[in-house]
Amino acid sequence: MMQFTDSHCHLDDKAFQAQLSTLLRQCAELAINRIIVPSIAPNNFDNVLTLAKKHHKNPIEIFPCLGIHPWFLQDLNDTHLELLTEKVIQAKNDIIAIGEIGIDGAIIKRSDDPDKELVKQQHFFDFQLNLAKQQDLPVIIHHRQSHDKIMPFLRRHQLNKAGIIHGFSGSYQQATDYINLGYKLGVGSTITYSRAKKTINTFKRLPLESLVLETDAPSMPLSQEVIAKEALSNSELDKLKKIEFAKSTASTPVNSPANSPVNIINIFEVLSTMRAESPEQIANQLELNIEQIFFN
């Protein structure tokens, strides 16, 4: 039976609090056996760690990561980086990565002082990459309009375990540059939007060994476009019919209004129609990729 991992889900978000137990049971029914939960700021470090301990293997495995997201730096300083370092060392046996970290070009452009914002984001990013290297951990990297700003840092640090470029939506050449440094690319809801032709064509061409699935729930909702099955080719229809997950037996519908980790199944379906490999081959390799990054 195929198994799935959501490599990026903010499961500690308040959007999931009321129905979290039900959601986790549904994930188990759909063979989504692992969810990786990155933190975003010091005020949710403990939430992420506690969540993972509370629900460990009950009914699925939850793995925490610690990091500071570039969206939340406004009131932060080096004291918070010191706190992150302390937390990472204390929780070294529990966390599996440093993340979510990165550089966000859109935030920089909207800033009152773009140069100052860029310097601060670079400082936090550089510090956290160095922390990952010191602790021999992979990283989960946020990008937006910032591939050119991120790549020099990755080349300089050359992390042993590399990590994941979260929600990748760049060009084939950018993807290849990351892969050559050892990084995997997060395949998320972007591929469910037909207008995302560049990203879709990139994921069609990349080696399967470089991909992982993610939802970024509750953010990054799926496309609301209706993919008419009669518009699919016969080979694509055959491929869909071979996918053997427990969708029909789930206790609640897979297509929930808000994005959630169950939508990994939808993303997997779309990826399967794009690739030449069988769904079984795809699912197995995606899980091997997760093992290689986080559990070797």
Image (cartoon, rainbow, N blue to C red):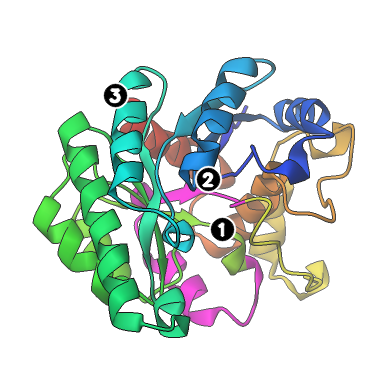
How far apart marks 2 and 1 lie (CA) works out to 9 Å
Residue at image position (39%, 76%) is 105
| Residue 193 x %, y % | 65, 73
Specify the quadrant of the image occupied by residue 92: top left
Specify the quadrant of the image occupied by residue 205: bottom left
As for residue 73 lying within the magenta part, the answer is no
Q: Helix, strand, or loop for circle 2?
A: loop
Residue at image position (53%, 40%) is 43
Disc 3 crowd rating (10 Å Cα; few below 14, some 14-19, many 20+) is: some
Segment colored magenta = 192-216
How far apart marks 3 and 2 lie (CA) works out to 22 Å
CB atoms at circles 3 and 2 under 8 Å apart? Answer: no
Q: Helix, strand, or loop for circle 3?
A: helix
Closer to the observer: label 3 or label 2? 3
- Frontmost residue, 226 versus 93: 93
Specify the quadrant of the image occupied by residue 162: top left
In this rendering, would 226 be left or right of 284?
A: right
CB atoms at circles 3 and 1 under 8 Å apart? Answer: no
Closer to the observer: label 2 or label 1? 2
Closer to the observer: label 3 or label 1? 3
Residue under pointer 1: 188
Residue under pointer 3: 89
As for residue 201 lying within the magenta part, the answer is yes
| Dot 3 amino acid type | Ile
| Dot 2 amino acid type | His
Q: Quadrant of the N terminus?
A: top right
- Frontmost residue, 165 versus 88: 88
In this rendering, would 205 be left or right of 129?
A: right
Residue 56 is at least partly visible in this image: no
CB atoms at circles 2 and 1 under 8 Å apart? Answer: yes
Residue under pointer 2: 8
